[in-house]
Image (spheres, helix red, strand yellow):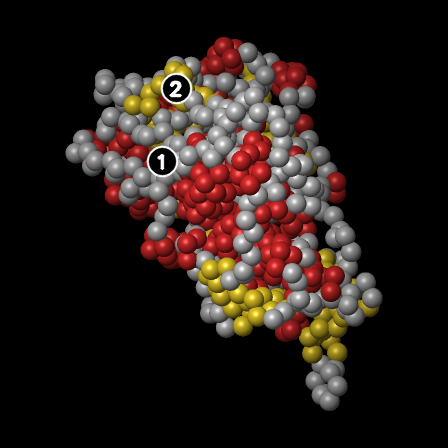
């Protein structure tokens, strides 16, 4: 579990309030924590010192969001000019989608490109181009790291020119394994058998694969170019169905669905990290006192550790955007020292820093270490606040919702697949500390079926040499039973139990006595897995290891062997025959990754076993299940490597031309009904010119005040929506020539293909063609102008809904 350092500048400017979630909200209040010397939005975990900062808004959310004058609001007005909008009203359908997307992204803590104008300044194209190049460069570095581990663990083939591949070596397959053929779909591996091809006398090896309607026979060389393993994250189950050799249309739909899911993940990532570019803070000053602080470190840093120091210092003192760096290094390799130097850089500049730890035990230990290190600086105050919780998805999402505006340093020995994935794909800065400190020796790992005799022997060996022992179980149930067994076996030894449900003071007392050496055997749950440094404890016993994750096991093993003394980790399982395939893979991984500095490789193995999951914390098993992890991940890297190609560039709204002659006049009745008709029409134009979100909010507010608009006003709004959507998509001109609707655009053919693949309507998809710099649609019949406008509205709305699958800047 990663410990996360969040560095927060004091004198920061509060970000603008989020858009009001409902047109019926009249005002809201913004809670802002009180920070000495400044103010800013931060987590309640900082403490309970708050002041209430209120801002009142008019009853029109449109006015508060767009800055233009609002539609006049009369709270006593209840009359409606026309009937409510129908369920098939295209404007209402479009508005509901935009509002739903906005609500979903805000709930997940992600930025929203629809309302980016309400945040800080937009990123320029030059900045985007520079960032894309940085992503691609870091991705290549990440791919090189992946190759080191995956070539051994997955049997994947590589091509130096083509980049990284997750294709499977057919000779590593076992009978019954599910595989994916890129063109046919999912099948079941039968065997590899030699056969003499027609017209030849020499036999060659063929791969035989069972499909729903027959058996395919592929030469091994061909199979190596097209086959992937089919597996799912956290699951070991058969696919929904096998592919068909004679009809691949079903597989093609599944593959396209997986590809669209990949593209959505890419654009979500780009939105998150481009949003960081919008956040600016002045670089921290380089402090001459850093040299004295560094001199207090009692060890000579390893080369990797020294480079991590340099990377973090550059992030803080040379960049104007917040730091977001992962420090990946084995247990005891010096990650905490990197964090302490970052803290010193920040607090010596008059700012505040916060270190978040996943458990109360680790928080107390860090408090002691940091308090001692900063004891020579009386002006720097160190405090602690803790409670029982581990970092779960909700806690991580809460941190993610505000961390885009602060400097973040994440420390981990075995980053979870999502964190590792972000670092290796270039979306997160990463520093690797893989060189072990001098005199460190690997922990000896012993794996065997459980027996009381083996447990007693392992513990007796450690106690006889004056050491201490961790005894870890996967759950609280069973701790008392083990305590009874060990008390009978070692009647003269001090033994205690520790778990997360103990009263805080009691747990603190137990841990203190264990650190001080009074308690010789500590029986606990995996509450002790993260970061504890007890140098006299050099044996750990883990019972029912199959119920722990691979990263958890690696962290638990890292609780021992913190000195030059040989340490032992004893992992027991009930019966090897009863282990699941995933548990057997974890067993193999732990046996093979026993050397110092292999935390990253083990995390990669974990990623291969568990899958990388969704970047924002929710497993996308459904999307991955369409094609399996390996092909899904390869498509993801392909999409990432082409982020500079898969771009749509919006055009200014005022440059969009809609060459459709339809301009009905507003009726005198409606003009008289509006409080200020000229202002209303002008505000509609201003809202459309600003962005999609403003236009949606304007229309919602208009209908709330006056009801469904009459025909002429509906046509005016549809024209505004069409031009706004066209500007977002990169369409400059829409013209009509006979039965052809033409749209001149700056998008490339690959982007057009991505859009059509993501479209839900086969009717619209089949009518579209890309020619030169134009998208053309052929209509079957001539339509009246008003119906043609509605048809264009529907078409652009569907193209616009495909934008989340694109990189849109």
Q: Is residue 193 left or right of residue 570?
A: right
Q: Secondary structure at mark 1?
A: strand
Q: From where the camera sits, is residue 671 visible?
A: yes
**Residue 763: horizontal and vertical position, in percent?**
69, 61
Q: Label 1 vs label 2: CA separation?
A: 24 Å
How many discs mark residues in the rendered view?
Answer: 2
Residue at image coords 44%, 25%: 57
Q: Is residue 113 left or right of residue 336?
A: right
The crowding category of the residue bearing disc 2, from other C-alpha atoms within 10 Å (few below 14, some 14 to 19, many at least 20), is: few
Residue at image coords 65%, 50%: 623
Q: For residue 604, which numbered disc appears in the image?
A: none
Residue at image coords 63%, 69%: 739
**Residue 473: horizontal and vertical position, in percent?**
62, 27
Q: Which image quarter: residue 789?
A: bottom right
**Residue 240: horizontal and vertical position, in percent?**
77, 52
Mark 1 and mark 2 in contact? Answer it, CB < 8 Å.
no
Q: Secondary structure at mark 2?
A: strand
Name the residue at the front extreme.
Answer: 668
> Which residue is label 2 attached to?
53
Q: From where the camera sits, is residue 336 visible?
A: no
The crowding category of the residue bearing disc 1, from other C-alpha atoms within 10 Å (few below 14, some 14 to 19, many at least 20), is: many
Q: Nearer the viewer, residue 245 or 441?
A: 245
Does 241 sit above or below residue 206? above
**Residue 533: horizontal and vertical position, in percent?**
43, 27
Q: Nearer the viewer, residue 323 or 701?
A: 701
Name the residue at the left extreme.
Answer: 288
Q: Is residue 32 left or right of residue 582?
A: left
- Which label's residue is closer to the chain start, 1 or 2? 2
Q: Is label 1 or label 2 in front?
A: 2
> Which residue is label 1 attached to?
407
């Amino acid at each position: 579990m990663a410990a996360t350092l969040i560095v927060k500048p004091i004198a920061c400017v509060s970000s603008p309030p989020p858009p009001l979630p409902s047109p019926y909200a009249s005002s809201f209040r913004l809670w802002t924590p009180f920070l000495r010397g400044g103010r800013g939005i931060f987590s309640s975990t900082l403490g309970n010192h708050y002041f209430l900062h209120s801002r009142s808004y008019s009853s029109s959310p449109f006015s508060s969001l767009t800055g233009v004058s609002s539609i006049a609001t009369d709270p006593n007005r209840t009359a409606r000019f026309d009937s409510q909008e129908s369920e098939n009203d295209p404007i209402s359908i479009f508005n509901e989608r935009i509002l739903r997307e906005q609500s979903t992204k805000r709930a997940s803590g992600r930025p929203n490109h629809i309302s980016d104008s309400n945040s800080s300044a937009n990123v320029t194209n030059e900045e985007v181009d520079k960032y894309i190049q940085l992503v691609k460069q870091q991705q290549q570095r990440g791919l090189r790291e992946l190759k080191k581990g995956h070539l051994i663990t997955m049997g994947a083939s590589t091509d130096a020119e083509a980049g990284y591949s997750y294709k499977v070596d057919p000779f590593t397959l076992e009978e019954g394994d599910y595989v994916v053929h890129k063109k046919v779909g999912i099948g079941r591996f039968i065997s590899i058998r030699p056969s003499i091809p027609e017209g030849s006398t020499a036999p060659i090896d063929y791969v035989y694969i069972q499909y729903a309607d027959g058996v395919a026979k592929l030469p091994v060389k061909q199979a190596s170019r097209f086959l992937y393993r089919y597996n799912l994250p956290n699951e070991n189950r058969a696919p929904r169905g096998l592919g068909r050799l004679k009809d691949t249309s079903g597989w093609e739909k599944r593959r396209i669905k997986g590809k669209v899911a990949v593209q959505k993940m890419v654009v979500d990532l780009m939105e998150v990290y481009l949003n960081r570019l919008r956040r600016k803070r002045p670089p921290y000053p380089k402090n001459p006192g850093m040299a004295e602080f560094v001199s207090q470190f009692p060890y000579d840093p390893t080369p990797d550790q020294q480079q991590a120091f340099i990377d973090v210092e550059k992030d803080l003192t040379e960049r104007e955007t917040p730091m977001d760096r992962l420090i990946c290094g084995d247990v005891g390799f010096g990650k905490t020292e990197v964090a302490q130097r970052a803290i010193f850089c920040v607090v010596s500049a008059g700012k505040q820093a916060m270190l978040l730890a996943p458990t109360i035990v680790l928080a107390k230990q860090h408090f002691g270490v940091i308090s001692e290190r900063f004891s020579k600086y009386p002006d720097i105050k160190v405090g602690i606040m803790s409670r029982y919780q581990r970092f779960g998805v909700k806690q991580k999402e809460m941190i993610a919702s505000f961390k885009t505006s602060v400097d973040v340093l994440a420390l981990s020995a075995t980053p979870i697949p999502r964190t590792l994935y972000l670092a290796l794909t270039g979306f997160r800065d990463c520093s690797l500390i893989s060189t072990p400190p001098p005199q460190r020796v690997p922990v000896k790992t012993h794996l065997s079926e459980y027996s009381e005799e083996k447990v007693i022997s392992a513990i007796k060996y450690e106690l006889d040499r004056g050491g201490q022992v961790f005894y870890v179980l996967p759950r609280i149930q069973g701790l008392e039973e083990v305590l009874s067994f060990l008390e009978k076996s070692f009647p003269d030894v001090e033994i205690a139990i520790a778990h997360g449900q103990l009263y805080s003071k009691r747990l603190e007392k137990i841990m203190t006595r264990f650190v001080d050496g009074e308690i010789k055997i500590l029986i606990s749950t995996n509450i002790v897995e993260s970061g504890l440094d007890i140098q006299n404890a050099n044996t750990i016993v883990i019972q029912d290891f199959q119920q722990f994750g691979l990263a958890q096991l690696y962290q638990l093993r890292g609780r021992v062997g913190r000195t030059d003394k040989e340490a032992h980790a004893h992992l027991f399982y009930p019966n090897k025959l009863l282990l699941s395939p995933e548990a057997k893979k974890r067993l193999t991984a732990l046996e093979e990754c026993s050397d110092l500095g292999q935390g990253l490789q083990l995390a990669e193995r974990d990623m291969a076993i568990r899958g990388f999951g969704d970047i924002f914390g929710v497993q996308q098993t459904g999307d991955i299940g369409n094609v399996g992890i390996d092909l899904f991940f390869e498509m993801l890297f392909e999409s990432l490597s082409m982020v500079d190609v898969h771009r749509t560039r919006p055009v200014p709204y005022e440059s969009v031309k809609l060459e459709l002659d339809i301009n009905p006049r507003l009726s005198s009745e409606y003009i008289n009904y509006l409080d200020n008709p000229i202002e209303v029409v002008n505000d509609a134009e201003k809202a459309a010119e600003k962005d999609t979100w403003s236009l949606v909010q304007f229309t919602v507010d208009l209908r709330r005040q006056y009801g469904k608009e009459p025909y002429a006003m509906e046509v005016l709004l549809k024209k505004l929506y069409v031009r706004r959507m066209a500007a977002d998509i990169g369409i400059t001109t829409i013209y009509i020539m006979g039965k052809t609707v033409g749209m001149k655009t700056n998008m490339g053919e690959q982007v057009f293909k991505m859009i059509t693949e993501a479209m839900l309507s086969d009717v619209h998809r089949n009518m579209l063609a890309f020619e030169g710099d134009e998208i053309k649609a052929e209509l079957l019949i001539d339509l009246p102008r008003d119906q043609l406008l509605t048809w264009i509205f529907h078409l652009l709305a569907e193209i616009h809904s495909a934008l989340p699958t694109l990189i849109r800047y």
